[in-house]
């Protein structure tokens, strides 16, 4: 965490010069009575010094974030998991590696372990670096941390002050990373873009202040998206874009990663609010779009200009919409959720230039409904955890193929697939290895790897390194190391 000298420097900066006492008092009220970053414009500091407030010509406080560099070094491991649900948005590793199918009694080898702030924010991995959006409760800052994949040592950390009270943890989101940029979404809906190698600041947007967004219950859970455009279409002429669901003045917006310029903003005619669900890109009949579950339904938005291509208001979830849409075929989108929502399959069709989304089937929650983590579509089948906590395999007609039975329950934990194997975590930190096969539930190994509680953070895997977390600790396991006979 930020050292005591930096903290003292921050306090002193509020006290002097005397001529700014009044401004200082007002600013302190903001700091201790609400969201400290509200109304502040982020700027890149000239040096690695503690965050210090300044006053512009209009009398508004501008905040400088803080970049601290450490002695960690990026590893030369080549694998990547650059965003929520991996490179292809499907929670499936495509690495050509041999993964262990059995483990020692105490589980896979632990490569490193670090303490993290309370929350469920998972990792992104790229170019030998691990990125997490953490919360430093002692210093009351969002902390964007870059670690070495090899040993977990911190390389750099960028922090900005935001007061966040404990509410089932604080941080929840996974960064989006490219070779040049990292984009994060903090608990109070601050979108930050940094240089992914150096941590140098590019821009920040306050979605609440600038776009009238509302912080969702239990804080923001949406994971940002960086999109360079369809390879078939040659990409976007303005470069990579951060795609963010706002749910205030605009439903979704595209932001230039280099400059922070707003490229387009979708209309929000029904006043839908931000949910915990993340945006998923897809293409339908040659048209690239972003699919998003807002508070009032599900929508498809044009990647070209942000126009609304289609919407369906039959999909609404009471209290919290968490899982993301899953594309399971050309124009087929599978939706699922908790709070008695169950699941629904949508089919997109296009007629006379107009796209519509109609339900193919709907399943009651006891059949299937993913409460927290997004299901996985793999080799023609859907795998996920339903409300009775059983791992379940569905076919594309909504028929249950198998369940893990009441003898194998997994709570609200995450899961991914690699090399035909499902890695699934339960609430208390037990990691289970099973076959991703419609033939039936076959368990290969199980071991307690975290203390818990609430081992709910999204998983990431790269170069055979599996990164997991519980409420307060993140670990990295070597899942390529085979157990002895």
Image (tube, rainbow, N blue to C red):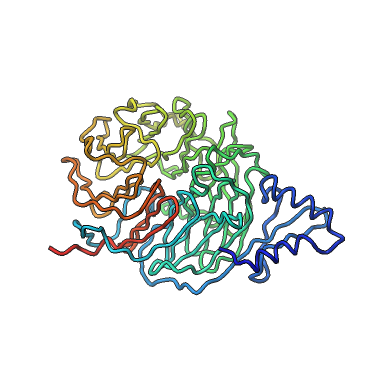
Vertical placement of 398 versus 442: above or below?
Answer: above
Residue at left 48%, top 68%?
154
Q: Find residue 285 and report its horizontal and vertical position in percent.
A: 39, 40
Considering the image in quadrants, where does the N terminus appear? bottom right
- Is residue 458 visible from the viewing direction of this image? yes
Q: Find residue 15 and report its horizontal and vertical position in percent.
A: 79, 61
Label tally:
0
> Which of the pair 189/104 is nearer the observer?
104
Q: Is residue 111 left or right of residue 136?
A: left
Of all residues, the one furthest to the left in this rendering is 485
Q: Is residue 444 left or right of residue 461?
A: left
Q: Quadrant of residue 288?
A: top left
Residue at left 33%, top 25%?
364
- Is residue 327 visible from the viewing direction of this image? no
Q: Find residue 108 and report its horizontal and vertical position in percent.
A: 26, 60
Of all residues, the one furthest to the right in this rendering is 19
> Which of the pair 37/455 is nearer the observer?
455
Q: Is residue 229 left or right of residue 428?
A: right
Q: Find residue 179 and report its horizontal and vertical position in percent.
A: 47, 64
Q: Quadrant of residue 3?
A: bottom right
Residue at left 64%, top 55%?
161
Considering the image in quadrants, where does the C terminus appear? bottom left
């Amino acid at each position: 965490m930020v050292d005591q000298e930096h903290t003292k420097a921050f306090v002193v900066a509020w006290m002097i010069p005397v001529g700014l006492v009044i401004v200082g008092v007002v600013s302190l009220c903001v700091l201790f009575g609400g969201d400290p970053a509200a109304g502040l414009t982020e700027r890149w500091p000239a040096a690695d010094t503690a965050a210090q407030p300044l006053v512009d010509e209009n009398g508004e406080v501008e905040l400088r974030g803080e970049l601290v560099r450490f002695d960690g070094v990026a590893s030369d491991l080549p694998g990547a998991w650059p965003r929520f649900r991996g490179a292809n948005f499907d929670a499936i590793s495509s690495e050509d590696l041999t993964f262990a199918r059995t483990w020692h009694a105490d589980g896979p080898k632990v490569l490193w372990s670090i303490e993290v702030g309370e929350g469920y924010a998972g990792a992104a991995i790229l170019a030998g670096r691990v990125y997490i959006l953490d919360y430093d409760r002692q210093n009351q800052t969002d902390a964007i941390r870059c670690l070495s994949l090899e040993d977990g040592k911190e390389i750099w950390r960028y922090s900005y002050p935001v007061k966040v009270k404990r509410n089932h943890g604080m941080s929840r989101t996974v960064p989006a990373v490219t070779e040049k940029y990292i984009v994060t979404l903090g608990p109070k809906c601050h979108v930050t873009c940094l240089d992914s190698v150096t941590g140098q600041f590019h821009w920040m947007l306050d979605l609440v202040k600038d776009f009238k967004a509302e912080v969702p219950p239990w804080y923001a859970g949406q994971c940002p998206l960086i999109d360079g455009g369809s390879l078939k279409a040659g990409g976007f002429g303005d470069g990579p874009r951060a795609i963010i669901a706002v749910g205030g003045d605009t439903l979704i917006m595209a932001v230039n990663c280099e400059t922070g310029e707003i490229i387009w903003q979708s209309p929000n005619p029904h006043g839908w609010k931000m949910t915990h669900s993340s945006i998923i890109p897809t293409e339908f009949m040659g048209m690239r779009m972003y699919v998003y579950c807002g508070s009032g339904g599900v929508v498809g938005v044009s990647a070209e200009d942000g126009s609304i291509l289609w919407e369906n208001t039959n999909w609404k979830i009471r209290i919290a919409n968490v899982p993301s849409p899953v594309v399971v075929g050309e124009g087929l989108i599978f939706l699922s959720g908790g709070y008695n929502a169950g699941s629904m399959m949508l089919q997109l069709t296009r007629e006379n230039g107009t796209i519509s989304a109609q339900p193919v089937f709907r399943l009651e929650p006891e059949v299937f409904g993913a409460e927290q983590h997004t299901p996985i579509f793999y080799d023609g089948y859907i795998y996920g955890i339903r409300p009775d906590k059983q791992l379940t395999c569905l076919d594309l007609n909504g028929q249950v193929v198998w369940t893990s039975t009441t003898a194998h329950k997994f709570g609200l934990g995450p899961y991914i697939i690699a090399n035909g194997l499902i890695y699934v975590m339960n609430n208390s930190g037990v990691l289970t290895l099973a076959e991703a096969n419609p033939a039936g539930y076959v368990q290969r190994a199980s071991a307690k790897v975290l203390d818990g509680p609430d081992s709910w953070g999204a998983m990431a895997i790269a170069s055979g390194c599996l990164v997991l977390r519980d409420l307060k600790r993140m670990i990295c396991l070597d899942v390529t190391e085979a157990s002895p006979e």
